[in-house]
Amino acid sequence: MALGNASTSRTPTASVGGARKGSRPARYSAFDIFRRGVTHADWPRSFNEHELKKSYDVVIIGAGVHGLACAYYLAKNHGITNVAVIEKAYMGGGGSGRNTAIIRSNYLTPEGVRFYDRSVKLYEDLAVDLNYNVMFSQRGHLTLAHNDASLRTMHWRAEVNKLQGINSSVIDAKEVGKIVPYLDVTDHARYPILGALYHPPGGIIRHDAVNWGYARAAGHLGVEIHQQTEVLGIETAGGKVTGVRTSRGNISAPIVVNCTAGWASTICDMVDVKMPLVTHPLQAAVTEPVKVFLPAVIVSGSLHVYVSQTDRGELVFGASVDPYPSYSLRGSLEFTEGLATHILELIPSIGSLKLLRQWAGLCDMTPDYSPIMGITPVEGFLVDVGWGTYGFKAGPVSGEQMAQLVATGRTPELIAAFDLARFADGRLVGEKGAASVGH
Amino acid sequence: MLVIDCPYCGPRNSTEFRHAGEAGKSRDVANSTPAEWRRYLYEFNNPLGWVREHWFHSSGCRRYISSERHTGNNEVRWVVPFGTPAPSTTSDKETGA
Ligand SMILES: Cc1cc2nc3c(=O)[nH]c(=O)nc-3n(C[C@H](O)[C@H](O)[C@H](O)COP(=O)(O)OP(=O)(O)OC[C@H]3O[C@@H](n4cnc5c(N)ncnc54)[C@H](O)[C@@H]3O)c2cc1C
Ligand SMILES: [Zn+2]
């Protein structure tokens, strides 16, 4: 696909209808697919490369979904286009290209539920907004309860969700079995299923498409994305940010936004802002594709496992973070063993499926399982971090709200509860009950 | 797979251990100020590099031990019983990974 070539090639090749800065971007449409199919016309480049300028109004560090969405909404909602997204590797190479793409808003606190629900709404319109098929499939999300304590938490979550107008309710094991016939809902399972929190608007999305769609749309609005450019330091004067040092030269900028998730502490260290973050790897795995049989996303907190089936037919599994902090992206046999054991408790019939691959991504865990967004003690240095194992679903809303903060200088209501100062003030936003199994 | 050379039991798979946090954190239960508690509870160095930390050998001798590990590749430089002074090592800049 032209997209893959464009994002990896370092030499900008002139191609038909190339989206040069200032030129009107070619829109994707069914008609266009047909036309290029018959005429064999090249697809336009989706992204461009730029010389690094000496100064920008805003520098965003990290080209994951958070950095890219922030750049897009800065340009689209606020007309701020003199923006550089600086990425040390390639766009979507961090958690945003490694996650299991589960989207939901059935969290535990009113602050969390409101916030994630705004993201679900933005995701619902994203394909049209970006002119990019992000394949959002709202197929329903089930969090299983295997004991009374988790059933109680499910009821708690359902009530909080309903108060915020979210479609979320507790259903019993029989109903679970009706929605997902392949689950073992009998009471002779080792961990019998007592019921589930059912969240119909939850589902999965094509994560790469979200990243690329934001990048393409932001690029068309004039934002520059600089891949293979590492931020090495941040310059300050009198407690204010003045710019960043990168592997391709220095940039001056009055505002720097840290969107580096698992690497967030390393960036905050550059300005001596101590963070309540610990980086843990989170692993996932995928099986060979089989005929589609799993209609919903299944999560089990007690068994520390979750599963969904892609449109291609692969089963995508995830679990909890690795048990000690690390920045290493190596997979482990312990993970696969634990995963297989637990998933077979739930769906015994997939015992002979083969795992195709496993991988890991970095998660910046916070003490309360909520993100850290907004201002820091260093003026002009903003953070959008603490995304732990659950941040992909928050990409759109975080981008939108951080862009508003940058543009207006005021912290928007929707993210006020997630400020860094909450740890000093003892105002934690405890989401562990809704986010301890990573997804 | 991470192998930790327990000073009491010898080399064991990390699954036998429970990570017990970065070393060098302390608080005085009776006298710490709120600011000190905050630092103790919520501020982590979380470096990409060498880190001194503690482990609890929960499925082994059930004793605490201390180690120095590189968080980039999980290489463990040394392991000593908890409370033993750290062996002198080269600085981060000389090794690193
Ligand atoms: C296995 C796995 C499964 C997950 N499943 C889900 C899920 O189902 N649903 C969900 O909502 N979330 C999930 N998550 C979490 C989600 O992936 C992340 O929270 C989210 O992608 C974070 O996005 P980001 O844009 O903040 O950071 P990232 O996508 O991690 O991007 C950060 C970028 O910063 C760059 N960077 C770092 N240091 C520098 C530097 N010095 N200079 C320049 N660039 C730098 C990195 O190269 C990287 O590209 C999962 C995570 C993992 C690992
Ligand atoms: Zn031991």
Image (cartoon, helix red, strand yellow):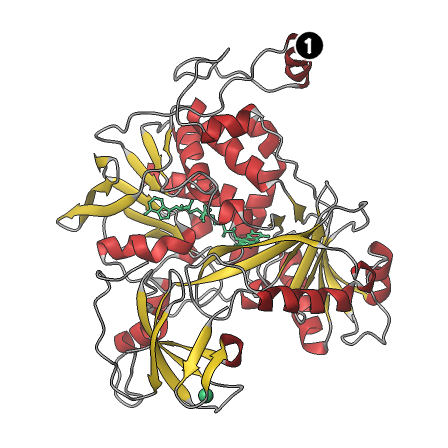
Q: Quadrant of residue A256?
A: top left
Outermost residue to the front: B10
* Visible residue check, residue A225: yes
**Callout 1 crowding tier (Cα within 10 Å): few <14, some 14–19, many ≥20:** few
The residue at the point 49 percent across, 80 percent down is B12
> The numbered mark 1 sits on a residue in which chain?
A
Q: Nearer the viewer, residue A301 or A73?
A: A301
The residue at the point 36 percent across, 42 percent down is A88
Relative to A20, A310 lies left or right: right
Query: Which amino acid does the dot numbered 1 rest on?
Result: Val
SS of the residue under disc 1: helix
The residue at the point 74 percent across, 46 percent down is A289
Q: Residue A124, image x and y in percent?
A: 63, 38
The residue at the point 38 percent across, 63 percent down is A277
Q: Nearer the viewer, residue B50 or A317?
A: B50
Quarter of the image with the N terminus of chain A in it: top right
Residue under pointer 1:
A38
Q: Residue A274, image x and y in percent?
A: 28, 62
Q: Residue A241, image x and y in percent?
A: 21, 45
